[in-house]
Amino acid sequence: MKLSKNDKVKLNIDALTSEGSGIGRYDGIAVFVRGTVPGDEIIAHIIKTSKNYAIGIIDEIVTPSVSRMESDCLHSKKCGGCSFRHMTYAEELKYKISRVNDALERIGHLDIKADEIIGADELNGYRNKAQYPVNICDGELFAGFYAYKSHRIIPCADCKLQPAEFEKGIQAFAEWVDKCNITSYDEETGKGLLRHIYFRKGFGTGEIMACAVINANHIPQPDLLVSLLNRKIPSLKSVVLNINKEKTNVILGEKSVTLWGEDYISDILLGKRFVISPNSFYQVNHSQCEKLYKKAAEFADLKGSEVLLDLYCGVGTIGLTMADRVNKLVGIEIIPQAIQNAKKNAELNHIKNAQFICADAPKGAEILKKQGIKPDVIILDPPRKGCDKTLFDTIEKMSPNRIVYVSCDSATLARDLQILTSKGYCAEKVAAVDMFPRTPHVECVARISKE
């Protein structure tokens, strides 16, 4: 039977998509329904059909799954951030490790599975960074997150994933917006001042950075904004303007101006101090990051004599936490501000055996080759799209004994592991780490050795 829009059909949900939607089948056609749990029996209202699949919404839950629970967030059904607030954490972890193993088998064609998933101790308030899109209507600030697959803002200053200080910061921005007649950026016209509100927190220090992403070079009454933020956030360390006048959906511009305090905040990770600027990459979950880096160090199996190459090094965190276990550390990163932070981080921690190079990973690797530096162990921590394919040829020539691959996307990890396998390397171990509880994302770390 062909499905049509507005049909109502009974479904048994037996799986989840990579975005966390439930999958049921009706007469052989896959139907995707957000907010469902494997084991649910539901009546779905069909809202979209195509040749091979359909999309539905819950009309009625006939029999709830044993893994279903009541969401503790009023915004979760509309917001595109959390996918699993209606699901037990045990079921969420089960889904995440199965997703990793499915990618390793189906995409990588690898005879290996993640042998563990390292769960989180805290499911709420764990994010050390938040970027709120904003809309200002009649002087009132609405800040939150985009609805699922849209640019419609769901007001949500009190997000369960963010620390309490961020909500206080939104309140300060709201007062400033009201008193100074601030306008919000319009994506269609390219006009309006305030694009995003951005916060960072160092969980090891308590320090907070507040950042306004603006479509101009200046803001009205900056001293008032600083005063309001200081009143609301006692641990405030930095107030920054990020200038983004481009007609783009990229959140941050390249230039930042400090209005008050320091240009950065600091954090303590595995006993080492790190400075973090607005544009610098830094893992968003402090406690899970420490678990991830401990697992990466275990997989690196360092003895003290090695040259360790940290590609995509960001502010140097992962390499610098291992620097006291190697002879030499080299970090490569394309963002200049991050490299400046990495050098400062080495200095702050009195690390003398570290060198940092500002370049993309393939070019940086070629620089090392010209310097005659041959790594024994390579750390790969690329963005979600994975490694540049040309990088693997350079890695093959460097011929490290071991590679530790940290990934935020199991699909690109599986793809890249297959490429490394074709170049004489073998993935020996994979572990999953739940860096992002209540969302569909999962981090992985793999140990890869030369065959």
Image: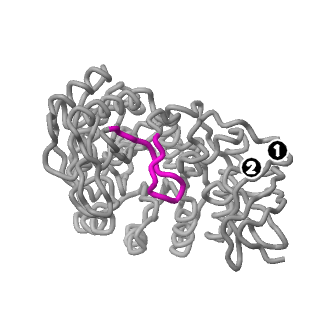
Label annotation for residue 37: 2
Frontmost residue, 129 versus 135: 135
Q: What element carries label 2?
A: loop
Label annotation for residue 64: 1
The residues tagged by marks 1 and 2 sit, at their Cα atoms, a distance apart of 8 Å
Q: Do the residues labelled 1 and 2 touch (CB within 8 Å)?
A: yes
Q: Can residue 69 be seen in this view?
A: yes
Residue 335, position as x, y percentages in the image? 26, 55
Residue 438 magenta-highlighted: no
The residue most toward the bottom is 51
Q: Which colour scheme is used?
A: one colour
Q: Can residue 377 be seen in this view?
A: no
Image quarter of the N terminus: bottom right
Disc 2 residue type (three-letter): Val
* Residue 120 position by quadrant: top right
Disc 1 residue type (three-letter): Pro
Q: Is residue 312 above or below residue 283?
A: below
Which region is colored magenta? 140-155
* Residue 320 position by quadrant: top left
Q: In this view, does 113 lie above or below 417?
A: above
Image quarter of the C terminus: bottom right
Disc 2 packing (10 Å; few <14; some 14–19; many ≥20) = many
